[in-house]
Amino acid sequence: MNNTVKLFASLLVATSLSACTVLRGESDLGHYVDDSDLTLRVKQKLVQNDQVSATRIYVETNSGNVILSGFVKNQTQADVALKAAQSTHGVKKVYNKLVIMPNEEQK
């Protein structure tokens, strides 16, 4: 899958997940826009990094706090994803809920 398709898929997922929060009334529109932007920028860093499978890592953002979840092959991939999120301007804190599955086939 080329990077353009990965980025488009990431944008679609990020927008869908973030929209749910606003529709439930958990945040105002300003927070929604800021969080969506952070989610997009973190996902972009993951897509551009060949050391991780961005399609297997999910990014959620709430009030500048980022949650990484999904599957990686090893600790190195988890560390790379964590550093990518932490180095994104505007991110307050990153919660790493990535699961290491060394025998999992990464798609």
Image (cartoon, rainbow, N blue to C red):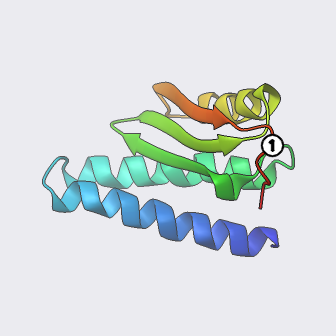
What is the x, y in percent for residue 75? 77, 26
| Res. 38 in view | no
Nearest the eye: 84 or 96: 96
Task: Identify residue type, mark 1.
Answer: Asn
What is the x, y in percent for residue 17? 38, 59
Query: Which residue is painted at 60% across and 45% down in the image?
Result: 42
Query: Which residue is painted at 69% across and 36% down in the image?
Result: 81
Q: In the current view of this chain or complex, which residue is farthest to the front? A: 103
Tell me which corner region of the image, top left, top right, bottom left or bottom right, holds residue 70: top right
What is the x, y in percent for residue 43? 62, 52
Tell me which corner region of the image, top left, top right, bottom left or bottom right, holds residue 85: top right
Q: In the picture, which quadrant includes the N terminus? A: bottom right
Q: Is residue 57 left or right of residue 74?
A: left
Q: Which residue is mark 1?
A: 103
Nearest the eye: 25 or 28: 25
Q: In the current view of this chain or complex, which residue is farthest to the left? A: 25
Q: Residues within 10 Å of mark 1 (few under 14, many from 20)?
A: few
Query: Which residue is painted at 66% across and 53% down in the image?
Result: 56
